[in-house]
Image (tube, rainbow, N blue to C red):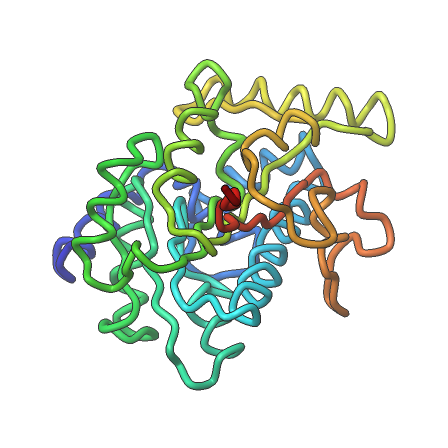
């Protein structure tokens, strides 16, 4: 975990260019963003007018999924690619769901700016005995899980909820996400839950929207975060043989919607798919 002064220097040195994490924060209505981030966000919105609602959909899905995990008795959460702390943080939702405050959360990001902001903001809002922000790379499962163990915050021998929310669309198939997700699934204890979501290009409402989604992918090809949109069928493989919780894998707004869910009346317009699956105990054959 980086120190307060180091975190502050990292934030200050980043203000000459947009931060993807702060742009996401801007679209969610947060205040941890700057003029350069807002200008970049407006340019994206010119090409994809509903991008802000898509990001809100992802964040809302995260909150509902964390709440459901906590209701099912999960008290340990590992949030990979967590970005900036903003409205509806995992530890906030988990503690609200379990008022006994017995939940433990490790936030993970490999972007220095996001980690720096996390360090500063968690210092004001979180319990350092139960909540930690660390640097690690989703693409290196063994190293990441070792760093999680080293925090002492989460016991990986017990069930955890592993969260990879709104991240997998930044990992192309050529970078072997299948083997990466399989490594995490194999490492987690029985009873663990896997929370996944990403943007999809399924069922655009018009040729204009289809082109807008293609433009979005093309735009990110010019950045350090190229990506790939996937259909529900293409995305389902990341859950492996884990058992999907009801209502299964589909458009995120249809996953246990509440009164504030964006696109609740038309989930297929959300451009976000997601689901939660559980690692069940292996069957024991009788001799």
Q: Residue at x 74, y 61 (%)?
A: 257
- Nearer to us in this view, 96 or 35: 96
Coordinates of residue 216 in the picture (x, y in percent):
62, 25
* Figure check: 124 above or below 164: below
- Nearer to us in this view, 70 or 118: 70
Q: Residue at x 53, y 42 (%)?
A: 166
Coordinates of residue 148 in the picture (x, y in percent):
25, 51
Q: Quadrant of the N terminus?
A: bottom left
**Residue reaching furthest to the front:** 287
Q: Residue at x 23, y 73 (%)?
A: 129
**Residue reaching furthest to the bottom:** 100
Can residue 43 be seen at all in this image of the molecule?
yes
Q: Quadrant of residue 217?
A: top right
**Residue reaching furthest to the top:** 174
275 left or right, relative to 155? right
Q: Residue at x 58, y 17 (%)?
A: 218
269 left or right, relative to 272? right
Coordinates of residue 278 in the picture (x, y in percent):
54, 50
- Nearer to us in this view, 195 or 12: 195
* Figure check: 104 above or below 265: below
């Amino acid at each position: 975990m980086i120190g307060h002064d180091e975190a502050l220097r990292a934030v200050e040195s980043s203000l000459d260019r947009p931060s993807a994490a702060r742009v996401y924060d801007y679209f969610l209505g947060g205040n941890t963003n700057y003029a350069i981030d807002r200008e970049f966000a407006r340019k994206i919105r010119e090409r994809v007018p509903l991008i802000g609602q898509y990001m809100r959909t992802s964040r809302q899905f995260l909150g509902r999924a964390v709440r459901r995990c906590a209701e099912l008795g999960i008290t340990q959460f590992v949030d990979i690619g967590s970005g900036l702390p903003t409205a509806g943080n995992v530890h906030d939702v988990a503690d609200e769901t379990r008022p006994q405050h017995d939940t433990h959360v490790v936030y993970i990001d490999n972007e220095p700016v996001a980690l720096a902001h996390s360090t500063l903001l968690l210092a004001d809002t979180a319990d350092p005995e139960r909540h930690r922000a660390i640097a690690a790379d989703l693409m290196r499962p063994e190293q990441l899980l070792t760093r999680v163990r080293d925090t002492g915050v989460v016991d990986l021998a017990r069930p955890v909820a592993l969260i990879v929310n709104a991240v997998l669309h930044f990992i192309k198939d050529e970078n072997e996400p299948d083997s990466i997700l399989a490594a995490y699934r194999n490492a987690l204890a029985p009873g663990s839950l896997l929370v996944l979501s990403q943007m999809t290009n399924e069922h655009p409402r018009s040729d204009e929207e289809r082109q807008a989604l293609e433009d979005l992918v093309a735009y990110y090809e010019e950045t350090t975060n190229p990506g790939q949109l996937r259909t529900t069928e293409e995305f389902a493989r990341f859950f492996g043989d884990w058992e999907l919780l009801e209502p299964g894998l589909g458009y995120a707004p249809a996953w246990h919607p509440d009164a504030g869910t964006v696109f609740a009346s038309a989930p297929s317009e959300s451009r976000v798919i997601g689901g939660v699956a559980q690692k069940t105990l292996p069957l024991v054959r009788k001799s």
